[in-house]
Structures are given as structure tokens and as C-alpha cells.
Image: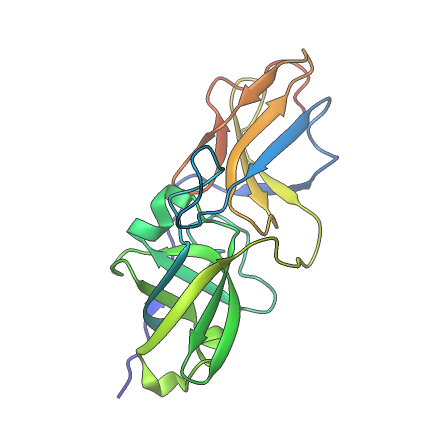
Amino acid sequence: MITKRLRTRHIMHGPLRRRMLGGGIAAAVIALTAGLCVPGSPAGAATLPAVGSASGIATHYVLQSGGGNCSYPGPPANHMFVALSAAEYHGAAPCGSYLQVKGPHGSVRVEVIDQCPECKSGHIDLSEAAFAKLAPLRAGIIKVSYHTISNPPLPGPVGFLVKNGSSRYWLALVVMNTGNAIASVQLKTSAGHWLKLTHANWNAWIAQQGAGPGMTV
């Protein structure tokens, strides 16, 4: 008998407000740098210590609320998503990227939105909808291979979430719908300076001292 596992992600940073690029932050420009982890990449290339290509096992789970440890407002509309081990999640580095996963009966594309604390490296936890593309749910655990997809087709434009409480003195953004993992985020303030944001484990890009005057969130 297969026992269904339920997992709720606990994000300790309060609600987030949704904003699309081009609105909500006055006189600001956001620059994103994408990075893809590819084994054997030349020195100096934009890489992340996330998932490149691997083989291992897959299980399935039910995400009870929210959009996982990556702090998205909810799962993707097609419910094709994956949670990674702590080692492969690596402080939210691969959030928003996509994996192509091959299993016994097929292949499926999934978005990285979550972390699986109990999983070891090489163990991915798929949504039930994604797992069912590879094998019957009753299989429970299957062997898989998976790799990161570069520049996948996306359902819409890049957007971001602005955390409640953000102001000229403190700012937190969650970048959405990027397709590739994001290596860095910089914000151009109304004063014309580029401000590099830091990446938190819950996938927010943060300006601890804020972005100065002109910020309207």
C-alpha cells in the first residue's frame, strides 16, 4: 500500500503582493542575470550550483498550500512541478527553472518550486500529476534521469512579487516566470544607482537597506 505524503511549505516572511514588471515600483529598472548549471562549463560562465543533469529516484507528494519553498503564490497552472533535495535546492538557486524528467513510461517537463527536506541528492519529489506521466502513482518510487532545460517556452511574461512591508528602507522581491534560474538581480533606483540584491533561501531578492527615495510599492 502506498501512503500519500502531504507537505506544507512554511514561509515565515508574511504575505506577498503581486506586481508585474512595469508597474508598482516607481522610477526603477530591474536587471536579471540568468545562470544555468551545466557540468563542464568553462571558467567565467554564468553557472549556479543547482541541477545540471543527473539520474536517481523520484517520488510524489501533495503540496497542500502556497507555491512551495520558492514563495510563489501557487503551483503552475498545469500542476507540473518538482521539489528538490536541500543539496540541489541550494538556497533557492534553481527556483523558477525547469527540468526534463524521464521515467519508465515517458518524459515530463516540471518547474522547480519547492524543496524536499527529507530527500537526499538525486531524489526528486514530483507532483502527482507529473509522476503520473512517468508511472502509475501506486509505483511510489521510480528510477529517473533528469536535466535542466535552457530557455524553455513560458506561459507569460516575467513578473515579480513585492513583499508587504517593502519601502524605501527595506525591499524584498520574488521574481516569477523566468524559465531559467536567476543568478543575480540588480535594481536601478531613482538616483541612477544600480543596487545588487541578495538572494534568500525562500527565493526573495532583498535590499536590506531599501532602494531609497522613489520607491512606491
The image's colouring method is rainbow
Q: Quadrant of residue 175?
A: top right
Q: Where residue 195 appears, x then y in whole percent?
A: 56, 19
Q: Where residue 117 appears, x then y in whole percent?
A: 28, 55
Q: Where residue 101 appears, x then y in whole percent?
A: 45, 69
* Left or right, 104 with reference to 109: left
Q: Is residue 21 above or below residue 99?
A: above
Residue at the image point whose x is 51% and y is 22% from the top? 170
Q: Where residue 123 appears, x then y in whole percent?
A: 30, 65
Q: Quadrant of the C terminus?
A: top right
Residue 64 appears anywhere in the view: no
Residue 179 appears anywhere in the view: yes
Residue at the image point whose x is 61% and y is 65% from the top? 77
Give the total of numbered labels.
0
Q: Quadrant of residue 173?
A: top right
Residue at the image point whose x is 68% and y is 28% from the top? 25
Q: Is residue 130 above or below residue 72?
A: below
Q: Quadrant of residue 84?
A: bottom left
* Left or right, 4 with reference to 159: left
For this orientation, the residue located farthest to the top is 191
* Left or right, 53 with reference to 157: left
Q: Quadrant of the N terminus?
A: bottom left
Q: Is residue 119 above or below residue 176?
A: below
Q: Is residue 11 above or below residue 184?
A: below
Q: From the viewer's side, name the closer residue of 164 and 180.
A: 180
